[in-house]
Image (spheres, rainbow, N blue to C red):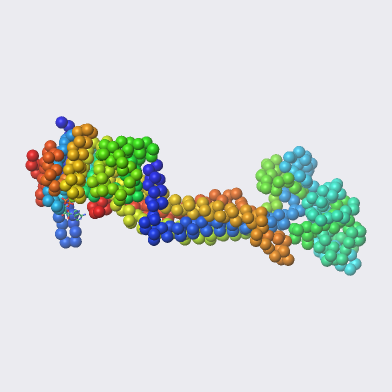
Amino acid sequence: MSVLINATQLVKEFKSANKSIKVLKNIDLTINKNDRIIIFGASGAGKSTLLNILSSLDFPDSGKVEFEGIDIFSKTDDEISAFRNQNIGFIFQFHHLLPEFTALENVAIPIMINGIPYKNAVKTAEEMLHKVNLSDRFSHKPAELSGGEQQRVAIARALINSPKILFADEPTGNLDSENSKIIQDLLLDLHNKLDLTIVIVTHNSELEKLGNRILKMEDGNIFKIS
Amino acid sequence: MFEFFIGNKYHKAKKRLSFINVINKISVVGIAIGVATLIVVLSVFNGFREISTALMTEGEPHLIIQTTNDSEDISNFLKSSEFVDLFYKFEEGKVLFGNKEHFEIINLILIEDSIFRSKQLIYNKLSEYDTIFYDGNLAISFYSAIEMNLQVRDSVQITSFESLENSVLTFSIPEITTTQIRNIYFSRNASLYKNYIFASSNLASEIFPNRNRNTQSIAIFLLNLEIANEFKTQLSANFPDAIVKTWNDNHAQILNVMKIESFFAYLLLSLIIAVAAFNILTSLTMSVQIKKKDIAILRSFGVSRKGIRNIFLFEGLLNGIKGTSWGFLLGLAIYFVQKYFQVYKLDSSKYILDAMPVSISFWDLPAIVLMSVFLSFASSYYPAKKASLTNIIESIKWE
Ligand SMILES: Nc1ncnc2c1ncn2[C@@H]1O[C@H](COP(=O)(O)OP(=O)(O)O)[C@@H](O)[C@H]1O
Ligand SMILES: [Mg+2]
């Protein structure tokens, strides 16, 4: 079992006018390859903050995140951007698709960033939309898709570059239970097919069965549940 | 290039927010107007400059070379040069010229006899309408002929200033040369037309008897006026002791004034483009504001700050390029219509031209296009830079 991400002593504090909240208090976390980690926690517990730091979108006040042994915060903006593009996939609570582009283009953009020409990128994106069972929605704009479909496009987009790890922040938070079930099955299926490491933060206890490791955040600390 | 793919989509997809769209259209139309105006105005400046240069230099030698050495070498060099149309030795001096009733002070140019007689000079270089020519000694302009009531075959007297001066100093009678008018010429070059007369060099020793003729002057006409400066360099290299002057050395001041005039017109009219391009800044700033979330998403899957900056630079530049292209076509269209159909006429009682002259100088076009694209780029840069600094977390949090 090899280590993918090793986070040590992460501290993050938000200061506003007269008070400051310590959202992460010296958090240590190791993520192994092929893990399916579910992190529970009440709203405001700091789950998103932790996820954003692990995925290089945000910076800690102190502490270190090593990805395959390399300190990601020592990289320049160009390097860290390329790193995100190659290694990390995201799904957010809101689908966050680009409204001006079709489903197919939304999925294709991450590999176009990589320098792949439009035609080839679109071809790969078609295959990816097949995998999330959306073969018949290529040319729909996000506004023309249902909530569940939007989230499946977002998953296709997150995985098109074959990232090593997928971070999902409340992936079912905005869906009814039927669509939530579809997403859960899809994530499990993709994990098996694509040899993917997954970290999901949620307060939806249904997602517990997706995980091989279950953690909980509370008061700026993280605990192992199982 | 994904930056172009996304920037282009943003550029096209503004119909939702009509306010931004309106500002965009204003910027495109404004830039187009500015570019078209620049092309037209500069081509008019250029047209007038070409005409006035042509008039100013009609009949004037393209180069003059002066030497104190034997001029034979120079003559041989000029004879064998493929660029030279005509050259001749000449002398020059102020004279008192007239008959018993009228006289005036005028510049006399004495031209190598064979050339003067060959009619080449008179027909090709001075006169457009000359019809009268007799072998002979003196050619005066139509202007002088009218002023002094003279005609062909009239006898006139010429006395040089040098011999007047000499007679005062030595208390002698000044040398007066009597000769016949043999030719009357017309020229649109006001200076030649009003202030000069021409004669054969046969009269040189008579009119300027005491002159020291160590220095020789040769006038040169080239087949192509444009290469005067290069030819000057060539002459100076071959004859380092000689003094060479081109027609534009003689008119340097007025030529410079005209150049400076068009340069300031270029700068001033660029302001139209600058004002129009400023609208790009406004619309792009708004576009960046409403796309904060898109920016954060793009950043989250690996677009660098530079990539974001480029997306919005493209979005802004596309407006600039669109406006520049339309303006370019419009300007050229107006230019060609004026050139071939002479839509804008001039009052022919006041001008010697019947329509506004237009001429595009080749390098004006890239200068105008570059200015316009540069100004669009400059107004896109700040909002694009601002876009690249968008905070990912802040912008991604909310739906
Ligand atoms: N930019 C910020 N400025 C101030 N406080 C913040 C900021 N971002 C998050 N917080 C606070 O940090 C705490 C944790 O937020 P978050 O990580 O989003 O929680 P969760 O995702 O678990 O609901 C919350 O109390 C939130 O109000
Ligand atoms: Mg959250």
Query: Please, which residue is most extreme toward the left here?
Result: A225
- Camera-nearest residue between A150 and B145: A150
Query: Please, which residue is most extreme toward the top here?
Result: A1
For residue A72, side relative to residue B136 (left or right): left
Name above or below for residue B241 compared with residue B274: above
Query: Would you identify the image quadrant in which residue A160 lies?
Result: top left
- Camera-nearest residue between B107 and B388: B388
Quadrant in the picture for the C terminus of chain A: top left
**Picture residue at 82% right of the left edge, 52% below the top:** B122
Quadrant in the picture for the N terminus of chain A: top left
Name above or below for residue B146 compared with residue B118: below
For residue A52, side relative to residue A206 (left or right): right
**Picture residue at 50% right of the left edge, 60% below the top:** B272
**Picture residue at 39% right of the left edge, 38% below the top:** A119
Q: Position of residue B273 (x, y in %)?
A: 49, 58
Q: Position of residue B250 (x, y in %)?
A: 69, 55
- Camera-nearest residue between B138 and A169: A169
